Image (spheres, coloured by chain):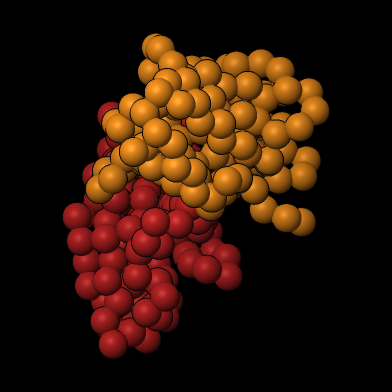
Amino acid sequence: DAKTTQPTSMDCAEGRAANLPCNHSTISGNEYVYWYRQIHSQGPQYIIHGLKNNETNEMASLIITEDRKSSTLILPHATLRDTAVYYCIVKMNYGQNFVFGPGTRLSVLP
Amino acid sequence: NAGVMQNPRHLVRRRGQEARLRCSPMKGHSHVYWYRQLPEEGLKFMVYLQKENIIDESGMPKERFSAEFPKEGPSILRIQQVVRGDSAAYFCASSPGTVNTDTQYFGPGTRLTVL
């Protein structure tokens, strides 16, 4: 079973920041938080991952709480093309498959 | 650097035929993972391979399914005697297999339709 809990769906206005929460209260010390998204039926797209520090790249920012029991993915200026299912996954960095939950269906509205 | 390649992108088979799905990992990646996504469902892990070795096949159905990742060439997911329930999108992912940077990158998938 997935080790994360995410809201089923969220809406966001185009141009605004999209903040997607994820709870992972049973995360262990050597597990990373990964975020992927799946646009329509395409292959999952890697967004970002982190261990305990906040991370930022060209796509998004990842904020991890100090106790590591939850995190937030931030898309700073959502566009219509960001409409997708977003998956938060915890796993060790090396080897090991991903266990996908149902994710959050983000709808970016014009 | 080309991404993960999968072919064919779409495959139609009749019940009882064999399906062969190919996955070429990203350059420099030595680990391959296969996942299946049934219609309106999430992705489910099937098998994890390194070159010439199956590391974890806990998600593979016990019969009719096999996978390989030879020393040369792509990884192959083989489904024998396909049934309608095998209709799904099959995704492979590859990773470099290094301890500090082992992010998986997914291919576009193969959509299998069994008539």
Pick whichever, B86 or B74, lies toward us: B86
Q: Colour of chain B?
A: orange
Quadrant in the rendering for residue B26:
top right
Location of residue A48 with respect to B58 vertically, above or below: below
User: Residue at horizontal 58%, vertical 70%?
Assistant: A58
- Quarter of the picture containing the C terminus of chain B is top left
Indicate the quadrant containing the N terminus of chain B: top left, top right, bottom left or bottom right: bottom right
Q: Residue at x 49, y 49 (%)?
A: B10
Name the spot of residue B89 as percent of width and height, x first. 41, 43
Q: Is residue A107 above or below residue B79?
A: below
Q: Is residue B59 above or below residue A8?
A: above
Q: Is residue A3 visible?
A: no
Q: Is residue A27 left or right of residue A8?
A: right
Residue B18, position in %: x, y? 50, 26
Residue found at the far left of this picture: A8
Q: Is residue A40 above or below residue B73?
A: below
The tint chain A carries is red
